Amino acid sequence: MTAPAPTTPRPAPPGNPAGSRSPALQRSLSRSLPRSLGAVLKLFWTGQRNHLLLGAALAAFTVLAGIALLGLSGWFITATAIAGLSAATALAFDVFAPSAGIRFLALTRTAARYGERLVTHDATFAVLAALRERAFRGWAQPGAARRLLLRPARLLFRLTSDIDALDSLYLRILVPAAAALGAALAAGVSLGLVNGWFGLLAGLWLLLAGLGVPALAARRALTPSRRRSSGLETLRQRIIDLTAGQTDLVMTGRMAAAQAGLAAADARLADADNALNRIEARVTAAFSVATALLLTAALLTVAALAESGAIGAPVAAMAVLVALAALEPFAALRRGAMELGRALLAVGRLAPRLVDQSAAPVRQAPADDQVVATLRQVSVRHPGAARPVFADVDLTVGAGERIAIIGASGAGKSTLLALLAGELEATTGEVRNRPASLLTQRTELFQDSWRGNLQLAAPQANDATLMAALTAASLDDVIRGRSTGAMTSPLDAPLGEGGAGLSGGQGRRLALARLLLRDAPLWLLDEPTEALDAATARDVLGCAARLAEGRAVVIATHLRREADLADRLLVMNHGRLTAEARRGEPAFDVLLAGLRPD
Ligand SMILES: Nc1ncnc2c1ncn2[C@@H]1O[C@H](COP(=O)(O)OP(=O)(O)OP(=O)(O)O)[C@@H](O)[C@H]1O
């Protein structure tokens, strides 16, 4: 798929940063955030529990090995220097055990770091891939995709930036936090062995400064990081609009306004970046101060302890180096703190779309085997619309029956098809139908291979099945003409966006072949040959009639040639079925004659 269709760029109104929300919406998002966060973390936990735990454990081990390495090295260097002062101690001093320990720690630390990167990233990408699939399914729910189609760029960002933002939760917040806590505990205990109070106070300081500074920074960064995230979305959207819609912009004299909008979005993004950079610089400074304080306190403490004879110089060197290294792991939380706002924004936006689709209600089939769909006293209202499109509609579609719905533009024909396709739910009344496939007014073909376009309807279908569908739609010669020797199968042949490279009739026939692959007993065809010339339309209709053999078909149409496929005509007028006629009845020919000719 390529970039979404351009929308008309508008400079954001002053004082209302792009992507910012109303206070009421902001409050409701904040209220639901703990639930949303719980839902996302649960997905992480249930999907990759063992890998996530192993990754955190390896991260903690790496950090501990680093601290131990520094402490042991400090002890070893000092102890060796002191032992070397006299020949007797130099000979008695065991250099092998500590140097083996140093080598062991250096090697295991490297291996653990490598393993940690491998395991944590592998687990995160696996979770994000699963999340992306769930998000796709969520947006494929009736109504959701329709709403997003009004702002296609938003869907693109939800699937890319928002899902990517979730990797921070685990990689940059939970893993460093686990490692840092492990470091605080280990440093507290090892310094406690030197002196109880020293260990306790150092441990408390590590927790207070190490967690307090990132927590404070995260709080400060919340707003700029959200502003950055929505600013980036706006900037990208406006760039797409500007590049994809430049002809329209020039023709309508809106180019200058679009450029101003782009510059404004860029300036807002730069503001947010600056705010984040300032906070990050302060965090770095705060960590330096906290480390310096800890180091000073450690130096004074070990000096006093050494003075009193409680510890020797090697242990003093070890304690100072442990204190020096212990705050380092907390600094890794800095990036997580900066990205927390973005991650929480993504959590709030994605969580409603991550519901388990298996729990979605499945529409019941009619009790009678000879019926594919029944509507009883059904009314339907489009989301956000003031009035229902239709009310109290009754309809029965028999197995294998062919019905054409005719009526003026805006009467509700497409809405009826959307209802039968499950794209819309009834506001009142009862709808029962067997699986239905909808051929929409616009042929939905994507920049992909022929195989990719066909497999949208049947992901598991093999090449033989796909070729059989193309043959049935008389497209086998077309695809063979497109394939080159370099392709392993003609199905690898590429298609352009919107079916570019195919004639209108070929595009419709390809869409019909895709319908065939879903094998639904009810086909819903929305103006299947609108905008095709008479000869091509006859070809497509002949193909549709042949492929639909044995299925029920409901066609929404204004055209005589399309309605002529039907056994029954239904007239829809302002959302009501006002007349009907069956083939063979005089009224059938009268209604047919009233429709638009070729
Ligand atoms: N997504 C929507 N949100 C709100 N109202 C809608 C939406 N889609 C359609 N409508 C309204 O519902 C009514 C019926 O539209 P519908 O597309 O079903 O008519 P139609 O008979 O198929 O028209 P046409 O023959 O022009 O395709 C119209 O008044 C239309 O404006």
Image (cartoon, rainbow, N blue to C red):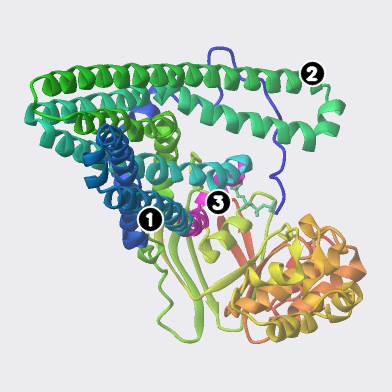
Badge 2 residue CB within 8 Å of ligand 1: no
Q: Residue placed at 41% from the left, 40% from the top? A: 172
Q: Residue placed at 63% from the left, 22% from the top? A: 265
Q: Distance between the residues labelled 1 and 2?
A: 43 Å
Q: In which quarter of the image is residue 78?
A: top left
Q: Distance between the residues labelled 3 and 2?
A: 32 Å
Question: Where does label 3 land, which residue?
Answer: 145
Question: Where does label 2 land, which residue?
Answer: 256
At label 3, the amino acid type is Ala
- Mark with earlier residue (1, 2): 2
Judge from the rendering whether residue 235 lies leftward or rightward of residue 211; answer left or right: right
Where does residue 392 sit, x and y in percent of width and height?
45, 58
Query: Residue 355's mark?
Result: 1
Q: Is residue 21 magenta?
A: no
Judge from the rendering whether residue 465 lies leftward or rightward of residue 326; answer left or right: right
Q: Range of the magenta residues?
A: 129-151
Where does residue 428 sit, x and y in percent of width and height?
39, 56
Residue 587 in view here: no
Q: Quadrant of residue 432?
A: bottom left
Judge from the rendering whether residue 86 lies leftward or rightward of residue 280; answer left or right: left
- Mark with earlier residue (1, 3): 3
Between 495 and 126, the residue placed more toward the observer is: 126
Badge 3 residue CB within 8 Å of ligand 1: no
Total number of numbered labels? 3
- Mark with earlier residue (3, 2): 3
Residue 453 in view here: yes
Under circle 3, the secondary element is helix
- Work out whether 351 lies above or below 321: below
Which quadrant would the N terminus be assigned to in this image? bottom right
Which quadrant would the C terminus be assigned to in this image? bottom right
Where does residue 2 sit, x and y in percent of width and height?
72, 50
At label 2, the amino acid type is Ala
